[in-house]
Amino acid sequence: MSVRKLSLIALSLLTPAIVFADASAAPAAQGGGFGPIVFLVAILAFMYFLVWRPQQKKAKDHRALVAGVAVDDEVLLSSGIVGKISAIYEQYIAVNVGEGVNLTFQRNAIAAVLPKGTLGSIKK
């Protein structure tokens, strides 16, 4: 038998027990109603400290990195290209990736600023 058939059989066997449950059973004790609210606040705090806050910090650090680049900085771009910045425009940068080869990228494509001399050690 397939899993679907087994689940349908189990559901059909349980349905009468659920529908015709004993109505004379004692009602469940009522709480103050703060349980779901506390749970929701705990989930939101968990999401804030483990998801939103680190992501905001990372975005802030990236904005500072992009704003702090200068001509002749060696950079790693998000595409994996390594080069030296030859010109900076308002929203774009020109990156020299070889002799006479300049490529233009958006500033946000900068993934990291490399230490001086990295390009020289890579080419050897």
Image (spheres, helix red, strand yellow):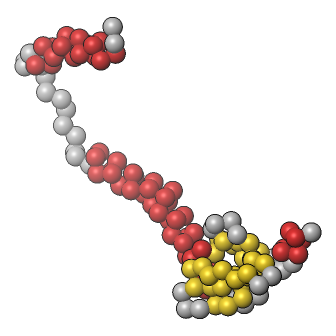
Does residue 118 appear left or right of residue 51 in this picture? right
Location of residue 35 with respect to 3 vertically, above or below: below
For the N terminus, which image quadrant?
Answer: top left
Closer to us: 33 or 19: 19
Furthest-top residue in this view: 1
Res. 61 visible in picture: no
User: Would you identify the image quadrant in which residue 118 lies?
Assistant: bottom right
Answer above or below: position of 33 versus 85. Answer: above
Residue 112 on image: x %, y % = 69, 72
* In-image side of 106 versus 14 (left or right): right
Q: Quadrant of residue 101?
A: bottom right
- x%, y% of residue 84? 75, 81
Viewport quadrant of the C terminus: bottom right
> For this rendering, which residue is in front, 71 or 123?
123
Across and down, in percent, residue 60 comes to 55, 76
Please say whether residue 91 is visible from this viewpoint.
yes
In the image, farthest residue toward the front: 100
Say which of 12 and 66 sits in front. 66
Give the mark count: 0
Give left or right: position of 51 versus 31: right
Q: Would you identify the image quadrant in which residue 15 lies?
A: top left
Q: Residue at x 34, y 12 (%)?
A: 2
Q: Is residue 83 left or right of residue 22?
A: right
State the residue at coordinates (72%, 88%): 86
Residue located at (22% from left, 40% from top):
31
Tell me what residue is drawn at x 22 percent, y 45 percent: 32
